[in-house]
Amino acid sequence: MTTTALLTDLYELTMVQASLRSGVADHPSCFELFCRRLPAGRRYGVVAGTGRLGEAIERFRFDDDDLAYLQSLRIFDEDTLAWFADFRFSGTVEAYREGDLYFPGSPVVTARGSFAETVLLETVVLSIFNHASAVAAAAARMHEVAADRLLIEMGSRRTHEHAAIEAARASFLVGFGGTSNLAAGRRYEIPVYGTAAHAYVLAHRDERTAFDAQLDALGIETTLLIDTYDITPGIGEAIAAGRRAGGTPGGIRIDSGDLGKEAEKARVQLNEAGCEATKIVASGDLDEFSIEALASAPVDAYGVGTSVVTGSGHPTANMIYKLVAVADRPAGELAPVAKTSLGKATVGGRKAAYRRLDPQGVATEELLLVGPAAPPPDTRALQVPVFAGGETVYPFDLEADREFHAKARAELPPEARGLGPGDAWLTASL
C-alpha cells in the first residue's frame, strides 16, 4: 500500500512533537475545512474530493521508509518517531457529499479526534479539496453555458500527470461527457475521446493520405482534424475521404481561428455536401466565456484543456482547515476556540450544516448550528459520514454523485448560475 503520510508539510509533524511534549496531543479536538470567501465573481463552489478523502486517511500511516527518512532529518525524538510508527487515524470525519455546493463558511469537512491526529491531516485534506473543488467549480461554469453540447476534458498535458486524473474526475462529476486521459478513464470508468493531432497530418504527404489512413484504422465515425493547413480545403478533403470510405466522417475538429465563424462556414460546407450528420468539435484555449460566446454557433462538442485543469485557468477554491474546538484535558468536553486576527477571524464550535429550500425548490439559506441541536424543519443535512472506526464509510459512486450534483446545482436560481460578476448566492450563517 502506498502511504499518504508524507504528502504533507513538515510543520504538521513538528506540531505533533511539540503537542506530545505539552500534553495537548491527546486532547479531543475538532477541525473544519471551509472558505472565508469565494473567488471574485463566483456565486457558488462545488465540493469535489469527498470520494477520495476516506481512502487517503486509511493510507495515512508511516511505513519503514517514511520513518527512516524522518529519522534522518534529526528533528524528531524517539518518542515522536514511535508515535508516528503506531499512527492510525482513530477519529471520525464528516463532509459535504461529493458534488454538493458550498458557500463562504460552509463546513465542507469536519474532523474529530485527538489534537495530534486531526492536525496531522491538514495538508492532505487541503490538497485534495482545494485542487478538485477548484477544477469542479470551473468545469461547472463551462457546463452551465455549454447547454446540451458535449464537453470533453483534454487538459492532461497542461498539469501534473496525477493531477490530470483527478481533474478529469472532477470535470466529469459536474457534467463533462468524457476525457482524453486514459488513466482517468480506467480508474473512474469515464468515457474517453481522442483521435489525432496536427503532428499526425504533418507526418503524411498530404491531408488526403492522412485522412484515408485514419478512417481506415479507426472507422468512419472518427473525427478528422481539418485545420493543419487551410480550413475550407481541409473540410473538402475530409468530405472526400469519407466518401471514399463509403459514408460521411463522424466529425471534424477546428482548433484555430475564429471558432464561431469557422463553425458557421463549416456547417454550410458540410450540409451542402450531404454531410448533415458530421459533427463539429471546437477546441483551442476555450473557457466558460468563449464557450458562452459560441452558444449560437453550430458546434456539437467542445474540447477544453488549460482553463479547466490549471490555476491560470481558474482561481483557487480558497479552502482552509482550522481548529474550531478543543478540550482542556484528554477526557474533557470540546469547547469552542476561534482566531480573532484581522482579516482571518474564525467562528468557534463544531457546526452542523443544513440547506433550506423555498416551495419552488430554490436554495434560500445555508444554516449552521453549533453544538447538539435538533435539525431545523424543512432543511436537508449537508454533511455525511466519511470515515469512522478506522475505515472509510463513504459510498463513493461517481455516477450517483454526478446525478446528485445536477440536482444540487438545479436548486440555484438562474441569477446564481450566470457568469457575470456577483457575490456568493448564500453565506453559511449561525
Image: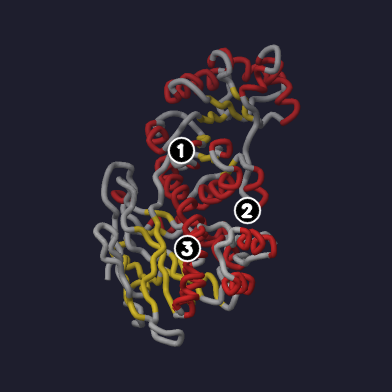
Tag 1 residue: 307
Kindly state the secondary structure of the residue where label 2 is placed: helix
Tell me: residue 415, above or below residue 266.
below
> Given this view, does label 3 or label 1 mark the residue nearer the observer?
3
Q: Looking at the image, which residue is at 48% across and 80% down?
A: 26
How dense is the environment of label 2, judged by Cα within 10 Å: few (below 14), some, or many (20 and up)?
Answer: some
Q: Residue 344 appears in which quarter of the rendering?
A: bottom left
Image position, residue 160 (x, y; %): 57, 42
Residue 215 in view (yes/no): yes
Q: Looking at the image, which residue is at 75% across and 26% down?
A: 216
Tag 2 residue: 188
Residues tagged 3 and 1 counted as in contact (Cβ below 8 A): no
Kindly state the secondary structure of the residue where label 1 is placed: helix
* Amino acid on which disc 1 is placed: Ser
Kindly state the secondary structure of the residue where label 3 is placed: helix
Tell me: residue 128, above or below residue 262.
below
Residues tagged 2 and 3 counted as in contact (Cβ below 8 A): no
Image position, residue 121 (x, y; %): 51, 65
